[in-house]
């Protein structure tokens, strides 16, 4: 479930919104249809943002951007497992720090008793809370994906799910329905016999697609997560073929859609062997 490129796109949007990058540069990347160019250029953004944090270590907006960029680069372009985990851990640390600066009572979300965690998440009620919830929830999800053999890491799934559910409650259409897609992925981590909830996952994926049909990555993750988990080849292949037949160009989603097409081709190529 390689969903981290979305974090890269969100990070660039955040960078544009806080004035750290000119809008034309940010959207130039988001609307680029050449993944190789972005792969080669992205490290420059990583170094710039990491460097800026030395000067502004308590800048919430910079921490959010650094979190998303590091997680994106780790998930999409890094193949070495140790380096991938190192960057994902760094991204999660940035997200936790941003959350702590945003709300002092949320400085220990990963370790506080679950009952206290539930109360804390309930207190997030404003639109300005969404970027912090999304950055932490999404990077935490990516980190868990890399540490599925660690029981302590898997034990945090309930916290991450509750956090992302809060985003959906506040704004179901946030980030083109990406929180709904994350909920679909979270409920597809495990097969039903081990506690997975595939039917709930399916509903979340369908809702994500409905929010913005032009967000092609939702169909890819739906096929990869739910389709393969439940061995539904017809659904799996239909979703991926729809992605390949769709137009990639959509303002703010072109780069992401090109990545979705690349993943759709890869998954379809292995469909016969998998099923």
Image (cartoon, helix red, strand yellow):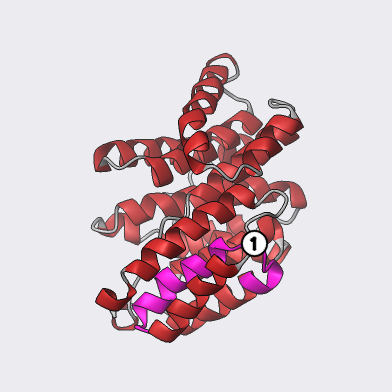
Magenta stretch: dominant secondary structure: helix
The reply to whether the magenta stretch includes residue 244 is no
Is disc 1 surrounded by few (<14), some (14 to 19) or many (20+) residues within 10 Å? some
Name the residue nearer the viewer: 37 or 230.
37
Residue at point 55%, 50% (across, down):
6
Looking at the image, residue 7 lies above or below residue 113 = above
User: Magenta segment range?
Assistant: 209-232
Residue at the spot of label 1? 247
Specify the quadrant of the image occupied by residue 156: bottom left
Residue at point 69%, 30% (across, down):
25
Looking at the image, residue 3 lies above or below residue 95 = below
Looking at the image, residue 170 lies above or below residue 184 = above
Residue 152 appears in the rendering: yes
Name the residue nearer the viewer: 237 or 62.
237
Looking at the image, residue 21 lies above or below residue 6 = above
Residue 72, given in percent of the width and then of the height, sits at 48, 43
């Amino acid at each position: 479930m390689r969903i981290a490129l979305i974090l890269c796109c969100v990070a660039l949007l955040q960078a544009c919104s806080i004035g750290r990058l000119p809008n034309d540069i940010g959207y130039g990347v988001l609307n680029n249809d050449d993944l190789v160019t972005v792969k080669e250029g992205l490290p420059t953004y990583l170094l710039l943002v990491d460097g800026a944090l030395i000067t502004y270590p308590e800048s919430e907006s910079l921490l959010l951007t650094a979190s998303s960029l590091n997680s994106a680069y780790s998930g999409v372009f890094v193949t070495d497992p140790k380096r991938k985990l190192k960057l994902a851990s760094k991204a999660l640390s940035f997200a936790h720090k941003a959350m702590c600066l945003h709300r002092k009572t949320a400085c220990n979300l990963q370790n506080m008793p679950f009952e206290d965690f539930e109360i804390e998440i309930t207190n997030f009620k404003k639109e300005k809370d969404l970027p912090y919830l999304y950055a932490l929830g999404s990077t935490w999800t990516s980190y868990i994906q890399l540490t599925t053999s660690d029981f302590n890491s898997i034990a945090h799934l309930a916290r991450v799910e509750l956090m992302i559910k809060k985003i959906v409650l506040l704004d179901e259409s946030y980030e083109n329905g990406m929180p709904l897609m994350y909920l679909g992925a979270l409920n597809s981590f495990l097969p039903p016999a081990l506690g997975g909830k595939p039917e709930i996952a399916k509903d979340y994926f369908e809702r994500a697609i409905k929010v913005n049909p032009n967000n092609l990555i939702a169909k890819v993750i739906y096929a990869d997560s739910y389709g393969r988990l439940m061995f539904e080849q017809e659904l799996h292949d239909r979703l991926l073929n729809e992605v390949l037949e769709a137009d990639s160009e959509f303002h703010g989603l072109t780069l992401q859609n090109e990545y979705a097409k690349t993943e759709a081709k890869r998954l379809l190529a292995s469909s016969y062997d998998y099923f």
